[in-house]
Image (cartoon, rainbow, N blue to C red):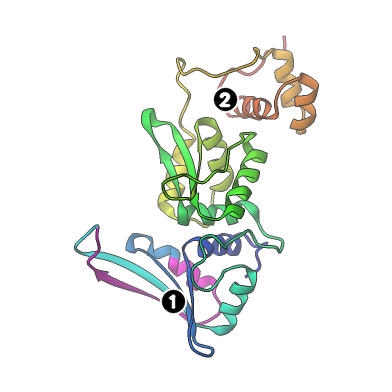
Amino acid sequence: MDLTVPEYAYMFGFLQADGHLYQGVGQKGRLSVELNSRDIDLLYRFKYLTPYNSSVTERTRTTNFAEHHTSAVWTLCSLEARTKLNNLGLPYGRKSRQIAPPTVVFSGRDYLRGLIDADGSVGRVDQGIPFISLTTSSSAIAAHLRGYAREITGVERMTNRNARDDVYNIIYEKEAAQILAADLYYPGCLSLGRKQVKAEAAASWTRPYDMRIVHSKRWTAAEDQVLLQSDDVVAVAEKLGRSEQSCRMRRWRLRNSRMLPPSTH
């Protein structure tokens, strides 16, 4: 469980959100993850990544949503493995408010993708607008996503608990969702296959011409050239007198052919 390795960072994020660590009498206990049987392939990937004996089983039962619901369960009992996960930040018992990003060095985007695959959503809403979201009870996790997404997209999100469920619902839409989804769900990454497909589909959305974009002032071809020629968005924003968010969005649209490139003549 070297969290600098993308697969393990993803796996740990997923386990923090959707795994359950039980402590029994003495050294007894287990880690388990239960998913819909359609996602069983991910549990086999976890089994393959784990150098301890573990099992993947299926069961069918009646739930509040279906008379016959088939789920897949990955179970790991090794005390050494459980101790390692617990030391990294996977608590025993109820954990939703306790979890936090690892204190060791870890692969950030893979860790976040694990959290979103477990407790988030990727897809499209009305008019095909792309979105990516995470629901969490943890203040530390909410702040981590907010900071990471701000660095990637330039978009700021408030992190307040909602009144009904007392959880954080953090949502990114439109171009911000496209940028974040492309960063997290890169080609060949370990992920839930169905969410990977939705993340890739988000890239095909183009803002309708009649959908308003709020700009403080029009961009000029000269400004576009300055923006494209530098990787330091903070410095460019200060030089042009624009916000970092505006610069990040403009550069992403230019680089991804969302508008005509600036003229050099």
Mark 1 and mark 2 lie on one chain; the one further toward the N terminus is: 1
Q: Residue 128 placed where, x, y %?
A: 39, 31
* Residue 178 vs residue 214, the one in the foreground: 214
Count of numbered tags: 2
Residue lying at the far top of the rendered structure: 265
Q: Residue 19 placed where, x, y %?
A: 48, 67
Q: What residue type is labelled 2?
A: Ser
Residue lying at the far front of the rendered structure: 163
Spatial CA distance of label 1 from label 2 is 46 Å
Say which residue label 1 marks: 75
Eyeballing the image, is 101 above or below 135? below
Q: Residues within 10 Å of mark 1 (few under 14, many from 20)?
A: many
Residue 186 visible? The answer is: no
Q: Residue at x 74, y 31 (%)?
A: 233
Q: What element carries label 2?
A: loop
Say which residue label 2 marks: 257
Residue 71 visible? The answer is: yes
* Residue 71 vs residue 159, the one in the foreground: 159
Q: Which residue is drawn at 46% across and 57% down?
A: 118
Q: Give the range drawn in magenta.
A: 43-64
Residue 59 counted in the magenta span: yes
Eyeballing the image, is 69 above or below 162? below
